């Protein structure tokens, strides 16, 4: 970062010393994980820049938006429609934390058996190191898994304003009605924050903006079907992670520019590696920034990741919201229609997800699947236990890995991944 953002961070109430320590870890980790990769597309330069300014320029943009009468909404789940936030005059940012930051305060609020994603969010909040959280005028939580549901009861102390969305747990008509109703309640809350009513033209424009973002990401993921793959799994994951922070229009243009470069590569038969590397699909819990541990181990071991069946991946971007619904109520119906298709493991039963893993593996020409769960994530761990033998029986090799953000198990994970790759090669 070339500009001195310390006055801005101070104004946001960050703990400057702790924040410096965080940036001191993030910068070298990013350089080690991403910049040393061979054959990186030039288009990744934009994402390098975004990451170098992720706590700087982007936060400045959020603050400028607020100064002009706008607002910022922080979210933790792909069930929160960015379309509603944009239509009400807000900017939507992801707050999921992909790093451990446990403080005595967090340990006093959360049971030990809480997943690292929730613990990380609490750690960042209590240590005052996340400028996105500090800039958020409203944080939207959701009653998805038990961990999150109970966490919101304590999380309110860290934020200016918290809105908790109730969530269906079953995919039936009652569940759909609940989600539709909750989107209506959220819209009212956002209208209050923005100080104006949302009209159907505004919501239509927001729907088009977010659909365009999903189309660009889908285009990127389709390009990963090529053999050899034109982009590494790490870089593709990074692009999908950045989608939760960046300005949606600028982001979409940058992804499309990257895709043009990748299309050229595919035409030339040029990949980041030779076509002979084992191709893997990652499936499971979302990987928030800077949780790059497992993908880095997998690609360092000689595989290439060709897809993410995750909320920071295909689960979060599959299906578009129907455009041209007309009235505001019909648009809310269209939003519900799209979001209700998300196959999160908090739903019981959730049979669509396994079908998506099979379909994606085939489309991306994956030789196997690595199922990733955060320890104590009961929804994904439970599904993994059932999916593993069923996918194996269908001829799709699976490696089931439970790991958190700590680097301690890196060696052990590398050994397991290498053994899995040997199995695939055999
Ligand atoms: S739609 S996956 S973003 S809930 S890892 S906190 S499930 S114990 S993140 Fe998620 Fe929305 Fe579902 Fe997606 Fe709980 Fe599991 Fe922790 Fe999780």
Image (cartoon, helix red, strand yellow):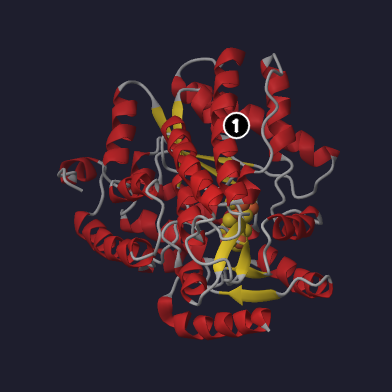
Foreground pick, 256 / 125? 256
Q: Give x and y (percent) for residue 158.
A: 40, 49
Residue 246 left/right relative to 360? left
Residue 182 left/right relative to 128? right
> Circle 1 sits on which residue?
211
Q: Is residue 114 visible?
A: no
Foreground pick, 237 / 45? 45
Residue under the image location 41 percent in, 32 percent down: 250
Foreground pick, 349 / 397? 397
Q: Give x and y (percent) for residue 408.
A: 43, 81
- Name the residue at the front extreme: 268
Q: Would you place residue 1 above or below residue 27 in this image?
A: above
Q: Looking at the image, in which quadrant does ligand 1 appear?
A: bottom right
Q: Would you place residue 334 above or below residue 80 in this image?
A: above
- Would you identify the image quadrant in which residue 253 lies? top left
Mark 1 crowdedness (10 Å alpha carbons): few <14, some 14-19, many ≥20: many
């Amino acid at each position: 970062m070339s500009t001195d953002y310390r006055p801005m961070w101070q104004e946001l109430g960050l703990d400057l010393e702790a924040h410096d320590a965080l940036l001191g870890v993030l910068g070298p980790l990013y350089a080690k994980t991403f910049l040393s990769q061979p054959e990186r597309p030039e288009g990744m330069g934009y994402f390098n820049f975004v990451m170098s300014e992720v706590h700087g320029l982007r936060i400045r943009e959020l603050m400028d938006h607020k100064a002009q009468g706008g607002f910022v909404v922080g979210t933790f789940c792909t069930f929160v429609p960015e379309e509603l936030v944009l239509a009400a005059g807000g900017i939507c940012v992801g707050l999921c934390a992909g790093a451990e930051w446990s403080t005595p305060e967090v340990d006093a609020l959360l049971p030990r058996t809480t997943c690292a994603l929730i613990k990380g969010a609490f750690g960042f909040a209590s240590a005052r190191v996340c400028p996105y959280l500090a800039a958020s005028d409203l944080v939207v939580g959701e009653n998805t898994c038990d961990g999150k549901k109970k966490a919101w009861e304590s999380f309110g102390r860290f934020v200016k304003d918290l809105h908790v969305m109730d969530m269906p747990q079953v995919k039936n008509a009652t569940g759909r009605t609940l989600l539709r109703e909750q989107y209506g309640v959220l819209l009212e809350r956002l209208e209050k924050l923005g100080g104006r009513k949302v009209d159907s033209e505004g919501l239509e424009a927001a729907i088009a903006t977010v659909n365009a973002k999903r189309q660009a990401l889908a285009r990127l993921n389709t390009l990963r079907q090529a053999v050899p793959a034109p982009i590494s799994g790490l870089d593709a994951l990074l692009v999908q992670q950045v989608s939760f922070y960046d300005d949606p229009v600028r982001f979409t243009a940058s992804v499309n520019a990257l895709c043009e470069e990748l299309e050229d590569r595919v035409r030339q038969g040029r990949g980041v590696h030779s076509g002979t590397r084992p191709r893997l699909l990652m499936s499971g819990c979302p990987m928030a920034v800077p949780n790059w541990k497992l993908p880095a181990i997998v690609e360092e071991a000689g595989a290439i990741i060709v897809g993410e069946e995750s909320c920071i991946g295909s689960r979060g971007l599959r299906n578009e919201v129907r455009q041209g619904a007309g009235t505001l109520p019909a648009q809310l119906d269209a939003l519900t229609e799209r979001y209700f298709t998300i196959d999160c493991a908090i739903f019981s039963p959730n049979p669509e997800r396994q079908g998506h893993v099979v379909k994606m593996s085939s489309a991306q020409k994956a030789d196997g699947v690595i199922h990733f769960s955060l320890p104590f994530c009961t929804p994904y761990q439970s599904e993994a236990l059932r999916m593993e033998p069923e996918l194996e029986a269908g001829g799709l090799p699976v490696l089931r890995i439970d790991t958190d953000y700590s680097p301690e198990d890196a060696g052990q994970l590398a050994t397991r991944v290498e053994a899995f790759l040997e199995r695939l090669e055999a």
